[in-house]
Image: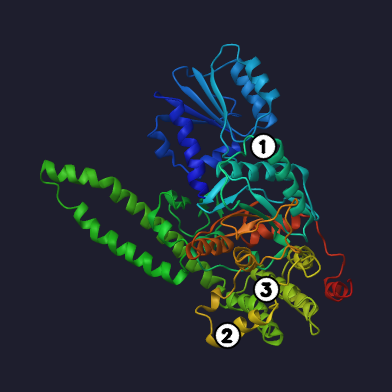
């Protein structure tokens, strides 16, 4: 179950099927992103694809010597663009691939438009999602719900994305969903409807244990997307932002022109592939080793070129040398900028208190530490609000809750009203009233003992104590202990054996911390394969945009009343 491989295979097949000769790849806005995640431009160029165009681009030239490979989402808009294209074809022959199921009536309209008979084939290749890591996919949807319910347009897109994922991995799963979420149940039903309607597509070779699709809701764990991260991929997304593998470094002081935007992709960057899940301290020493390797190779490459053999050797090694030089400068720049932000924003101290708020239950110590940091001028308004949100979520119903005082501290610190209002909105989004689970207190004697022993031993790293709630959910699922009264099956049948192939989808977005959890579970649990997906992949900034987009507002105009009112609402 490798989503990068699945999408890559589709694209390779499209190019192969079109045969030898020069080609243009015609895409839409979304499929451009889907392709760019799994193939570099230079890799595709080697397959005789010399031009990349958007179907909605108005000023494309007529190039009858090129074959066109069209990879498009089956939207009404794209079908209309194709109809116009086929009436006045710009290329010699067209191979059309839709990223999802296309209706018979749309195929008929295309056939009618193809008066010059330039279409060689029309097929469905189900690469209708963004393959982020081998075990992580996204639909790049920000703001999927209105209140607690789906935005209808986004529900349709999520259904398409999820069914395409199942088809690309050749899985016809049993479905479980989070009972406390209406949106999870709705999506489960929509996916089931598609499987029933398109049953012929889902007729795969039966496995002994059927695959399982588990649909969850971000509301159940609003803590994970609020925490600072310390592993490379997660940290880059949290502090710099990753958008389809691209990182915008244009705001970095003194940045050179060629590093204003860099690409971090495990597919073609060995250093990144080996380091994306390591913590920041290890990255620092690995960057140093990378630099030393580079320095060793550098003088050799630039020695005197006295003979033809010397020149030949230099030319042969130059691409690797140039690639290594690019890799070194890219990672040194990224890690340098992360270090600068960590010290400028005092993130080590901030993160330690975040971890205490997420993992410990000592109210007075947590309150004292949050108050201390709110007084620190190095702590930005963004980090200050994040700390107060974590406090508000954890100690929402604590008898000594001091949220009003912290809100006043935020105000005195000069934190804008926009940010202050978000505190109560986040509690409305993911507070105790809406959670189907208990995020903070261990539920049984075993869990309490585990937590106690963990406290005695001390954690290996104070900045990475937190484990997402997803870890516990998947651990129970793998052991066959996930409660059916909280995560029911859709339909009458249930799974008798422990699941082996698991696809988890989080409405409202997944995080790189959860992707790391899945990566570790895949590594340490023989016979179990897990793929994680979400409507998007969040950092704190995008998560707060998601919360705002949901249109949930605290039911009180005065934030200081929030807690007492929420406590008495049940």
What is the secondary structure assignment of the residue under circle 3?
A: helix
Rounded to the nearest angstrom, the CA distance separating label 3 from label 2 is 27 Å
Q: Is residue 154 visible?
A: no
Nearest-to-viewer mark from 3 and 2:
2
Q: Nearer the viewer, residue 234 or 11?
A: 11
Residue wearing tag 3: 387
Q: Is residue 351 left or right of residue 417?
A: left
Question: Which residue is at a point 60% across and 25% down the rendered structure image?
Answer: 58
Residue 18, given in percent of the width and then of the height, sits at 46, 25
What is the secondary structure assignment of the residue under circle 2?
A: helix
Residue wearing tag 1: 199
- For residue 567, the mark is none
Rounded to the nearest angstrom, the CA distance separating label 1 from label 3 is 49 Å
In this rendering, the answer to whether 401 lies above or below 290 is below
Residue 182, given in percent of the width and then of the height, sits at 79, 55
Nearest-to-viewer mark from 1 and 3:
1
- For residue 453, the mark is 2
Q: Nearer the viewer, residue 340 or 170?
A: 170
């Amino acid at each position: 179950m490798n989503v990068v491989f699945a999408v890559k295979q589709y694209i390779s097949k499209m190019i192969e099927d079109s045969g030898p000769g020069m080609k243009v790849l015609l895409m839409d806005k979304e499929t451009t992103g889907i392709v760019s995640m799994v193939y570099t431009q230079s890799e595709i160029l080697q397959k005789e694809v010399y031009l990349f165009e958007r179907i909605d681009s108005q000023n494309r030239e007529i190039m009858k010597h090129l074959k066109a490979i069209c990879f498009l989402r089956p939207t009404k808009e794209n079908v209309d663009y194709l109809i116009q294209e086929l009436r006045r074809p710009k290329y010699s022959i067209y191979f059309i691939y839709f990223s999802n199921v296309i209706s018979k009536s749309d195929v008929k309209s295309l056939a009618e438009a193809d008066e010059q008979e330039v279409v060689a084939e029309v097929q469905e290749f189900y690469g209708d999602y963004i393959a982020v890591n081998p075990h992580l996919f996204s639909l790049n949807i920000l703001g999927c719900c209105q209140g607690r319910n789906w935005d209808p347009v986004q529900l349709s897109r999520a259904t398409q994305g999820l069914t395409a994922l199942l088809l690309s991995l050749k899985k016809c799963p049993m479905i479980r969903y989070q009972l406390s979420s209406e949106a999870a149940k709705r999506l489960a039903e929509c996916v089931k409807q598609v499987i029933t309607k398109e049953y012929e597509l889902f007729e795969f070779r039966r496995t002994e244990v059927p695959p399982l699709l588990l649909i969850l809701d971000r509301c159940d764990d609003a803590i994970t997307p609020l925490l600072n991260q310390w592993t490379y991929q997660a940290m880059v997304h949290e502090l710099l932002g990753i958008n389809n593998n691209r990182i915008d470094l244009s705001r970095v002081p003194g940045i050179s022109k060629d590093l204003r935007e860099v690409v971090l992709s495990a597919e073609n960057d060995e250093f990144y592939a080996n380091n994306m899940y390591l913590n920041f301290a290890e990255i620092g020493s690995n960057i140093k080793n990378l630099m030393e390797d580079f320095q060793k190779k550098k003088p050799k490459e630039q020695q005197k070129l006295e003979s033809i053999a010397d020149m030949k050797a230099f030319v042969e090694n130059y691409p690797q040398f140039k690639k290594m030089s690019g890799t070194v400068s890219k990672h040194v720049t990224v890690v340098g900028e992360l270090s600068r932000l960590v010290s400028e924003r005092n993130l080590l101290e901030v993160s330690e208190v975040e971890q205490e708020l997420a993992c410990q239950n000592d109210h007075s110590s947590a309150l004292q530490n949050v108050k201390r940091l709110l007084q620190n001028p190095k702590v930005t308004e963004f980090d200050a609000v994040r700390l107060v949100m974590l406090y508000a979520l954890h100690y929402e119903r604590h008898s000594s809750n001091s949220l009003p005082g912290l809100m006043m501290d935020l105000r005195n610190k000069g934190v804008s009203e926009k940010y202050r209002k978000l505190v109560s909105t986040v509690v409305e989004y993911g507070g105790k009233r809406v959670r189907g689970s208990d995020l903070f207190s261990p539920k049984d004697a075993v869990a309490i003992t585990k937590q106690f022993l963990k406290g005695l031993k001390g954690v290996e790293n104070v900045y990475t104590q937190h484990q997402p709630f997803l870890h516990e959910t998947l651990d129970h699922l793998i052991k066959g202990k996930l409660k059916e009264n909280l995560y029911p099956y859709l339909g009458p049948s249930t799974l008798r054996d422990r699941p082996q192939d698991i696809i988890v989808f989080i409405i409202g977005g997944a995080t790189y911390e959860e992707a790391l959890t899945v990566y570790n579970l895949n590594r340490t649990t023989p016979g179990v394969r897990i793929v994680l997906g979400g409507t998007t992949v969040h950092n704190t900034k995008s998560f707060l945009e998601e919360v705002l987009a949901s249109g949930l507002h605290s039911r009180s105009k005065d934030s200081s009343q929030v807690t007492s009112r929420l406590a008495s609402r049940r």
